[in-house]
Amino acid sequence: MTAKPYIYVTRQLPAEIIEKLRRFAEVGVWPSEERPVPRDVLLREAAKADGLFAMLSDRIDEELLSAAKRLKVVANLGVGYDNIDVGKATELGVAVCNTPDILTDTTADLTMALILMAGRRLGEALECVKNGRWKSWSPFFMAGTDIHHKTLGIVGMGKIGEAVAERARGFSMKVLYHNRHRKPEAEKRLGAVYRSFDDLLRESDYVVCLTPLTDETRGMFDREAFKKMKPSAFFINVARGAVAVEEDLIEALEKGEIAGAGLDVFAEEPVRPDHPLLKMKQVVPLPHIGSASTETRWAMMERCAENLEAVLSGRPPVNVVNPSVLQRSHL
């Protein structure tokens, strides 16, 4: 009888997901939900694995891939995959799978929540009540900025960007967008208007970053970008922390060049408690929870399991980042 393939899971997951994997594979699991798998353990387990069930915080780099001689597939729990050396994986014939589509609406909801929290100062208001600083009422007490009828600028008009634009219409917002390629169908359906990057920065009241992290987008929100924004504008980042130069963002906030920021992502995660951005009252920080609803995370885990089973069974997965690997393997 043919031996089952071996899958290593880099976080403790619900028993139902592990059991689903065990139907077709031997499974090893790092026994912690919060503490990431140590590098030496990950390297050791990857070296004998046919499949990896990985998190965004796991570094699947050239060192790991070169040592993982049996590896056929990495299933990443998320839509982004900048933690994986996709080029090396492709060279070695390793399929890289992610979970797009599933998290689109949930992440768009979170994006709108950050816009509301930043613009209406909801984080400050919450702390005001909890800390006993709500003493009276006055006309401008905790007064923020409207969201309705403002201009929203979306940088990165993928599926999540389109879902954010759709929600913004419910707030009667004017929607601008910048993307590598114009999207006429989205313009027609959503009433979105294309702008150059610089013009979008100048015109928008809320600038939302939803780009993937690539060599082109790394550091695109720098000192010059923030200087182009309105002093009353807010920067919202639900993409990757490294698309913004954090030192330049801090400077822009300190100088009043922009009004505030809503950040679900940071250059280094978890962000350290003494980070300057966490000390600014005009910053709403969140711990990278864009897709963190129970329903969506379950669906993402199930999709990862499905992708692993497909590749290890010789079938094409639902989602694959490097399809040329499948063509070479005749999947």
Image (cartoon, rainbow, N blue to C red):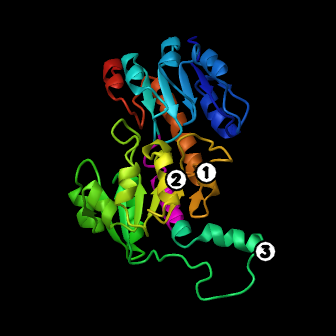
Q: Considering depth in this image, is 176 or 220 the residue closer to the camera?
A: 220
Q: Amino acid at mark 2?
A: Ile
Q: Where in the figure is residue 2, as x and y percent of width and height?
A: 56, 12
Give residue 6's quadrant in the image.
top right
Give residue 133's quadrant in the image.
bottom right
Whether the magenta-drawn stretch holds residue 89 is answered as: no
Image quarter (top left, top right, bottom left or bottom right) of the N terminus: top right
At mark 3, the secondary structure is loop
* Mark closer to the observer (3, 1): 1
Image quarter (top left, top right, bottom left or bottom right) of the C terminus: top left
Q: Considering depth in this image, is 149 or 91 the residue closer to the camera?
A: 149
Mark 3 highlights which residue? 132
Q: Amino acid at mark 1?
A: Pro
Residue contact between numbered discs 3 and 2, judged by CB atoms under 8 Å: no
Would residue 238 be visible to someone looking at this image? no
Report the residue at 25% width, 60% height from top. Answer: 195
Mark 1 highlights which residue? 276
2 or 1: tag closer to the N-terminus? 2
Left or right of 272 in this view: 250 = left
| Dot 2 crowding, Cα within 10 Å, few <14, some 14–19, many 20+ | some
What segment is highlighted magenta in the picture? 99-115
Q: Where in the figure is residue 144, as x and y percent of width and height?
A: 54, 76
Residue contact between numbered discs 3 and 1, judged by CB atoms under 8 Å: no
At mark 2, the secondary structure is helix
Mark 2 highlights which residue? 250
Residue contact between numbered discs 2 and 1, judged by CB atoms under 8 Å: yes
Would residue 327 be visible to someone looking at this image? yes
Q: Marks 3 and 1, how far apart in space?
A: 25 Å
